[in-house]
Amino acid sequence: MSIQSALVMKFGLLGCGVLLTAMNLQAEEVETSTQQDLDQSIELENIYITGGKDAVLKKPGSAILLDEVELERFEYTDIHRVLSAVPGVNLQEEDGYGLRPNIGLRGTSPERSKKITVMEDGVLAGPAPYSAPAAYYFPNVSRMSAVEVFKGPSTIQYGPATVGGAINLVSRQIPYASEGEVDVQYGSDNYQRLNAYQGQQVGDFSYLVEGLRVSADGFKDLDTGGDTGFERNDALIKTQWQILGATSHLFQLKLGYADEVSDETYLGLTTKDFDGDPYRRYAASQLDVSEWEHKQIQLSHVLEAGDLTLSTDIYRNEFERDWFKLNGFNSTTVSIQSVLNDPTSFSDYYNVLSGNSASSETDEQLRIGNNGRKYISQGIQSRGNQTFHASNLVHHLEVGLRVHQDKVESLHTEQNYNMAVGGDLTAVEGTSKTTLNSESEATAVAVYVQDEIEWGQNTITVGVRHENIETTKITYGNLTGVVEEDETLKQTVTLPGIGIFREVGPNLGLLAGVYKGFTAAKPSGNEEIEPEFSTNYELGFRYFGLGHLEVVSFINDYDQFAGACSAANGCDSANIGDQVNAGSAMVFGVEASWRHEMQMSAYQFPMIMTYTFSHGEFGEDFTDSTGAFGQAGQDIKEGYEIGYLPEHRLNIQVGIAKGKWAANVSALYQSEMRNVPGEGAIEDDDRIDSYTVIDVSANYQVHPSLKLYGTLDNALGKEYVVSAKPYGFRPGKPRSINIGAKYQF
């Protein structure tokens, strides 16, 4: 039986199970839309996986919910800036606009967010979370009403990556009265954003239509001139039908479309050039452009009968991208990174990059090509929740099942280009070639059981996740097109976890947890490749006196620490997707957050402070053959610190509001960090310096329907490095001012 046939059969069996359950439950006559019905429908919608802010406060394990009020405070459109207010998050900015986020949790690699589970409305959002987890597509936070972040034992509910945690982005919900909004924003570098939605309920039917367009000319300056910006479009349609009664049903259809064109590059600058002008772009990157298209469909059903809730989602995401970009020199011995590290010794190559001299030799020709990929991600998932009492215990039992399939087709091509004095690039005839031609496919069946038990002052969560994963990779000959490798990898894992929260006083609670973390391995031609496993611990407390204070310490003890080769970390095309096992490793740290809103006369003062200390070390010697952790061929020793993991990250937000107006200030500090593994003092070329960035926002409610707002990002104009991967130093966004207006109707 084919994978597709098996998947269809499993979909059908599960769908029949849901239907039979619904038929066996006694239905009542549909009532008119009273206020009670509306309350029931809102409850039925199950907006938040966390259960809302009240549930978060007593949840064993760490969970944070950023609701619409918090998201609107700074009107951020970059997910990196949004998550700066969440402890335990390590970020690696790239383009300054959040187009391709790099997010890690509790020390996991932030590169393309591939070590965390990313969801939209509880459904896997990555293009191919099992077979190619690097998230080159990420939902636009501008159209979200909330963001949920999970760490700790509850992570095992979501998968497939359970080492660090999970992020769930909650799209705008369908209103239950006629409602709409137009949000217009304009700012620096011709930044433009238009977001509009309208929705309403008509009887038992309701809908939402939303559109988003964002564009900018970019803040970098090409040596040859031209834009370095982007254009992105998003569209969303939701329709919903509900049947209310003793047994209630909700059916929802969600359709989404998005596309983007961005003049982005992986090419950065030398240390000297960055110090001179951090926003410069070399002439060699003038042809770099990324184009992609994303389509999603999701059909959901929620059934409620007393204390029983059964939710089912059938989903399919399609993502196709082409990234035409600079890959390197034609030389087999000189890399872009070596030139940027030592432009004096490689002056001829450096002058070619900058367009100051022509390619005088074949080795100095530039390899520029298209990284084309097609992704499919589809599946069905169902989860049931039942609350019941047994003796003096209250059980909140949740059982979940997901059958998932994803696939990626990779076709990478290259051609040599000659650089001319002044920056003109000309393709060299007869040099076009295929550098990667492969297909990867994965089928995964996951089931979990979790019981949250209330016992006096204690809340105990016990859970276990079981997954069967089968991944296949086919590699075709670049010249012949015939199959050269056909590999299949089967993995079966069982991941237990337990968390405890105990109220030790009216305002104080203690929490502790331990669970098994896992990241699936990928076929890579190496029979010794193993999945990533860790045993994760957390211990902390919550205080509910003056605001909400939470302090949690964590340890991620890796039995097997794994890295994957990608273009984003500078790996060669032939090695893309290959996994490197680093053996044992350990990441530990402390997360602290304090949230409070003080009332003084007619003034409100919202305050948020978050701090994260993180430290990670390799536990044994090995050779990084592909550059998955730093530099290709680097001998990494026991005790070397993990790259791209700052030890200190502090965010302070203070606001003031009275009547119709409000203002907020955010200060983010990040300590220095390594861009490659190492120990002792950090060399200049291997260091991302510390920085502090201050953002300011203000708004005024002109009319109940009209609000004006303004934002000033990087108010002090700090010039700072966000990344040195894969080629040279790249800057954070400079000072930028935006003004906007929201009209509600």
Image (spheres, helix red, strand yellow):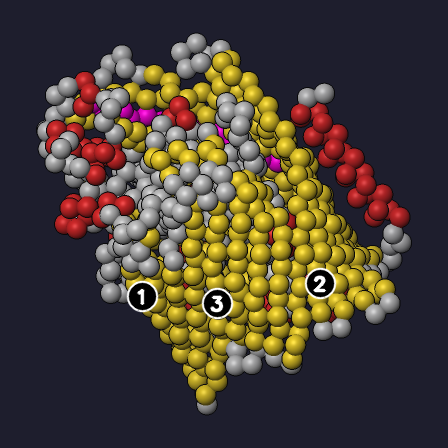
**Dot 1: what SS?**
strand
Q: Does residue 290 lie above or below 680 as drawn?
A: above
Q: Neighbour class for label 1 at 10 Å: few (<14), some, many (≥20)?
A: many
Residues 639 and 192: in front is: 639
Query: Residue 322 falls in which quadrant of the image?
Result: top left
The x and y percentages for residue 227 are 25, 42
Query: Within the magenta stretch, is there residue 376?
Result: yes
Question: Left or right: where does residue 265 sit relative to residue 591?
Answer: left
The x and y percentages for residue 615 are 42, 55
Say whether residue 255 is visible: no
Q: Does residue 103 lie above or below 184 as drawn?
A: above
Q: Neighbour class for label 2 at 10 Å: few (<14), some, many (≥20)?
A: many
Q: Which residue is drawn at 83% across and 48% down?
A: 22
The residue type indicated by label 3 comes to Ala
Which residue is identified by label 1? 694
Q: Which comes sooner in the sequence, label 1 or label 3?
A: 3
- Mark 2–mark 1 Cα distance, whole angstroms, equals 40 Å
